[in-house]
Amino acid sequence: MITEARRRVRAPSFVLKLVAGIGLIYSVLGVAFSYVGAPIAKEMYLFLQDIGLDLSGMVEASELEFSSDAFLWAGVNVALWSFVLFAAGRMRKLRNRGLCLFAAVLAMVPTQCCCGIGMIVGLWCLSTLGDDEVRSAFDRPAPRPVPDSVRNEILELIRKRQSAQSKPKTRRAKR
């Protein structure tokens, strides 16, 4: 039953990781551009004006300055896509169903990029997580590995019992 649930969440969790990775890369580039790229773009604009190109109809120089709003928004997107990427990994392992549901909803929120794909993948993840078999697989606790010392003791007891059972039984004479 758990193996079937793992099979069902494999594809949606992989695609969710892929979308979150693309969104994360795009957001990190957004942070970098809003911090470094805007001053470079402004210098290029001023240089093109100095050599005689008139770009005033296309963009104004004031639009090419550092924007703390864009920097903040890109930073929020980095956090959002990092969370979705983490939750997609938890979904693959059938852990924290509530966290996975929240990440699927976050993937559907239209942010900088991947909004159309994120909507489709988020709905796919929600429908997969809503399946009864997958839901019950999330509710089960993970089997804990048996420590080597305990396993060796159990095997020794089994061997002793088997050797005691394999010995021929002798009857005692009645007195």
Image: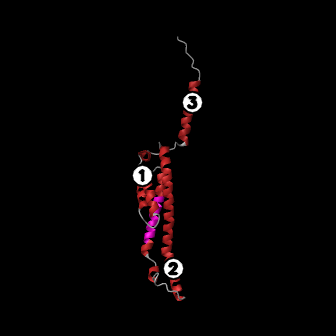
Does residue 86 appear anywhere in the picture?
yes
- Crowding at label 1, few (<14), some or many (≥20) Cα neighbours within 10 Å? few
Could you say whether the residue bearing mark 2 is in a helix, strand or loop? helix
Relative height, residue 90 to residue 159 (above, below): below
Relative height, residue 73 to residue 104 (above, below): below
Segment colored magenta: 72-85
Q: Which mark is residue 160?
A: 3
* Farthest residue, direction front: 57
Residue behind mark 2: 41
Tell me where residue 152 appears, x and y as whole percent: 56, 38
Could you say whether the residue bearing mark 3 is in a helix, strand or loop? helix
Residue behind mark 1: 127
Tell me where residue 140 appears, x and y as whole percent: 43, 44
- Crowding at label 3, few (<14), some or many (≥20) Cα neighbours within 10 Å? few
- Mark 3 or mark 2, which has the lower sequence index? 2
105 or 80: nearer the eye? 105
136 or 121: nearer the eye? 121
Amino acid carrying label 3: it is Lys
Which residue shows up at 44% across the image and 82% down it?
Answer: 62
- Mark 1 or mark 3, which has the lower sequence index? 1
**Which quadrant of the figure has residue 125?**
bottom left
Q: Nearer the viewer, mark 1 or mark 3?
A: 1
Q: Residue 28 magenta-drawn?
A: no
Tell me where residue 99 appears, x and y as whole percent: 42, 55
**Disc 3 to disc 2, C-alpha distance:** 80 Å
Q: Marks 2 and 1: in contact by CB < 8 Å?
A: no
Amino acid carrying label 2: it is Ala
Amino acid carrying label 1: it is Ser
